[in-house]
Image (cartoon, grey):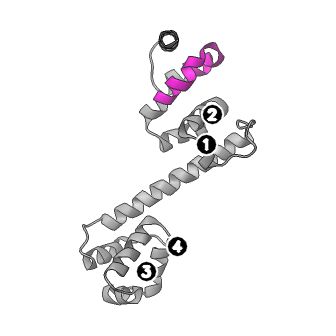
Amino acid sequence: MNGVGQHIESLIKNGGYSQSDIAREIGVPRQSLSYIIAGRRELSIPLALKLESFFNLREGELLKKQAEDNVRNHKRKLKKELVKRLSEANAFWSYASVSAEDVTDEELIEKVFIHLDLADIAKLFELYQREYIRKIWKDRMIIQGDYLFNLNVMIALYYFNIKQPEKYLKRIERKHFKKLLNHA
């Protein structure tokens, strides 16, 4: 069951109705309503409007919930695909086994940049906001210095449109070392 299906089911139960009652009132087959509640079918605009009218909901509320479910499911699927590709690339060599739930967002971003190709990197920008990706890149990858320098130059130019990336990378690296020295 998805979020919109759960919401419709709770509206039905809280109103003291059955699925058959609602289906009859709004003029749709009970099985169609049942499939939507179970998450086996998408909610159509006409049915959403009928349900919203019946339950006195704001126009578009159910479709918004459905869209949120779709986005959440799409992101979950993307993350699973990326973790699978990373596993195939042996990026998790030190793990006994790994699933998408085991991998933090920060770790996923770093490993995708290091181990996967441009098409996979593009998927990061569907999963996360650009500024978040940039922050993780800056906090976890730039500080590695020469080891990832050429990759970081490419990332700076291609993904973040940073002019003079070599100077930028060295400046970030110096700031990091100063911060480490001040904490020591």
Residue in view at x 59 percent, y 31 percent: 110
Question: Quick check: marks 2 and 1 in contact, CB under 8 Å?
Answer: yes
How far apart, in angstroms, are the residues tagged by discs 2 and 1? 10 Å
Camera-side mark, 1 or 4? 1
Q: CA distance from mark 1 to mark 4?
A: 29 Å
What residue does disc 1 label? Answer: 103
Kind of residue at badge 3: Leu
Of mark 1 and mark 4, the one earlier in the sequence is 4
| Span shown in magenta | 135-152
Name the residue tied to disc 4: 40
**Residue at 57% across / 49% down in the picture?**
78
Earlier-in-chain disc, 2 versus 1: 1
Question: Which is more N-terminal, label 3 or label 1?
Answer: 3
Vertical position of residue 30 compared to residue 69: above or below: below
Separation (CA) of disc 3 from disc 4: 10 Å
Residue 15 or residue 117, whichever sits in front? 15
Q: Is residue 129 left or right of residue 60?
A: right
Residue 130, image x and y in percent? 44, 34
Tag 2 residue? 111
Residue 75: give its label. none
Measured as percent of width and height from the top left, residue 172 is found at 48, 14
Query: x and y percent of residue 64 in the render?
Result: 35, 61
| Dot 4: element | loop
The amino acid pointed to by label 2 is Lys
Of marks 4 and 2, the one in the foreground: 2
The magenta stretch spans residue 85: no
Q: Which residue is mark 3?
A: 33
